[in-house]
Amino acid sequence: MDNNTLEVTIYGRTLNIKSSEENTEYLKEVANFVDESMNDIAEHYGSNYPRDTIAILACLNIADLLKREIANSKAGKDTLLALKESIASRSSKLIKLIDETKENSKE
């Protein structure tokens, strides 16, 4: 096996994946996640389902998780942006009030 090849086992099938040395641990984690996803599907539906059906269902579950994470991340960014705008607006109002108070106290 070549130094740039990582051997992983997913749902009982061993695969060799080309990988850079710095990606090895990450690819192991990803392969483990896919393996767990496929095994969860097989546990739920029964291991007599065809391997490709289990793989497709696992892909759908993983895609669903990804889409939800993206939506949550976007919602979080939108909330943060709204919060920043609110803080900026309130800060401007407070600065204006402070300036007005300073002017009134000079009189």
Image (cartoon, rainbow, N blue to C red):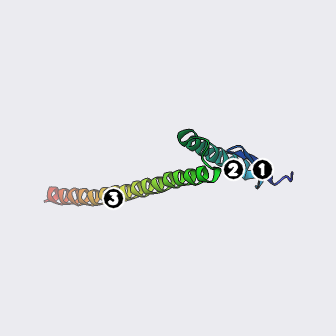
Q: Nearer the viewer, residue 61 or 70?
A: 61
Image coordinates of residue 47 in percent, x first then y, are 61, 41
- Asked if residue 103 lies left or right of residue 22, the reply is left
First in sequence: mark 1 vs mark 2: 1
Residue drawn 80% across the image and 53% down it: 5
Q: Helix or strand or loop: what does disc 1 sit on?
A: strand
Alpha-carbon span between mark 3 and mark 2: 37 Å
Dot 2 falls on a residue whose secondary structure is helix
**Which residue, given by chain and number where applicable, does mark 3 sit on?**
82
Amino acid type at circle 2 is: Leu
The residue positioned farthest toward the top in the image shown? 43
Q: Which residue is mark 2?
A: 27
> Pointer 1: what residue?
6
Foreground of the two, 21 or 10: 10
Give the amino acid at mark 3: Ala
Q: Residue furthest front?
A: 48
Residue beneath the point at 16% across and 58% down: 106
Contact, mark 1 vs mark 2 (Cβ under 8 Å): yes
The percent coordinates of residue 104 (x first, y second) are 14, 58
Asked which secondary structure carries label 3, the reply is helix
